[in-house]
Image (tube, helix red, strand yellow):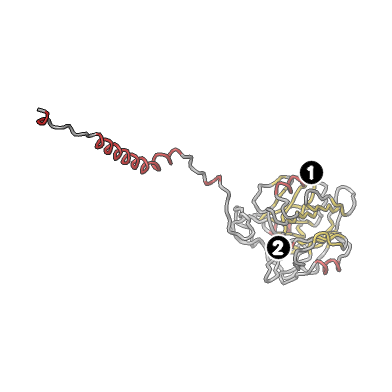
Amino acid sequence: MERGRKKKKNRWPVYVAVAIILVIIAGAGVYALKGKFTTADKPKTNSANQPRKTSASNGYVEQKGAPAAAGSMEVVDDADEAGWVKVPSKVKLDKFTDVSANNITIYRINNPQVLKTVTNLTDQRMKMAEVIAKYPNALIMNASAFNMQTGQVAGFQINNGKLIQDWNAGKTIQYAFVINKDGSCQIYDSTTPAATIIDNGGQQAYDFGGAMIRDGKIQPNDGSVDWKIHIFIANDKDNNLYAIMSDTGAGYDNIMNTVSKLNFQNMLLLDSGGSSQLSVNGQSIIASQDDRAVPDYIVMK
């Protein structure tokens, strides 16, 4: 009897093997579908909130606007010998006063006569020592930008009430700090024709960068002021002029917080970097890093 019974097979190893295979298949399916179901739960990146990148060597972000109002009048080949413009202040103070703070060199200039050195588009570069020799009892600072290869001054340029160079064609907003015949100061942008600026009394124009403060109002930060050395020209409510030069690493916020106490009406960024240089009464306050010759200086005495 015992011999006639069939032995039952032990099937548990088979069940275990099948279970393992099912687990492996299920795991593979979850892994394959993981990206499909989890990425939908992740917040999407809003590209508008990301920093704007630029390949420009100076890192500036172009500010778009209306086309430049160029061609309103003929330019001159030469504005003749540079002349002085009186900039009267509403108060009487010392001629030059150092009000520097927070790694920012700031000189206030009271009731000065002002001269712009560049008078045409030929190479008129001079070193600071040459300008000091001509005007030893003055505050002298480099002003408009220029082409490093040709020496030609860049941007919107007026001297002696004559147009040397008009606004550049294009849709990028450009700015110029203008001193009028009566000594008042204002910032124009490229939507205003040169003929209108000169008809309004424009005698000297200095050009390079963005308007930091205009008509007493801080302008949007366009990113042009970074950690590098920068120079600025400004006037306050009493029509004192200011020559300003920030040290490396001063930064936009520090600069704007520092000048906020000075009641500026207008403040324009001028040619910066290695061209930056300033002297007062024949003494070099900040020297160019490479003793650079530049074509356009503002001289105040």
Q: Is residue 191 above or below residue 122?
A: above
Q: Residues within 10 Å of mark 1 (few under 14, many from 20)?
A: few
Is 57 displayed left or right of 8 in the figure? right
Q: Earlier in the sequence, mark 1 or mark 2?
A: 2
Q: Nearer the viewer, residue 131 or 32?
A: 32
SS state under label 2: loop
Q: Quadrant of the N terminus?
A: top left
The residue drawn where x is 64% and y is 51% is 223
- Rendered location of residue 147, percent (x, y): 68, 67
As measured in the structure, the alpha-carbon distance from the residue carrying label 1 to the one carrying label 2 is 28 Å
* Front residue of 247 and 172: 247
Could you say which quadrant of the image residue 151 lies in? Answer: bottom right
Which residue does the numbered mark 2 point to in the structure image? 145
> Residue at position x 66%, y 48% from top?
221
Residue type beneath disc 2: Ala
- Quadrant of residue 174 in the image? bottom right
Q: Residue furthest front?
A: 2
**In this rendering, position of residue 281 left or right of residue 34:** right
Q: Residue at x 77, y 62 (%)?
A: 142
The amino acid beneath tag 1 is Lys
Mark 1 highlights which residue? 261
Image coords of residue 197 (percent x, y): 72, 57
Residue 254 point in image, percent of width and height: 73, 47
Using the image, determine if residue 258 lies above or below residue 158: above
- For the residues labelled 1 and 2, say whether their Cβ atoms are less than 8 Å apart: no
- In the foreground, 135 or 204: 135
Q: Which mark is residue 221?
A: none
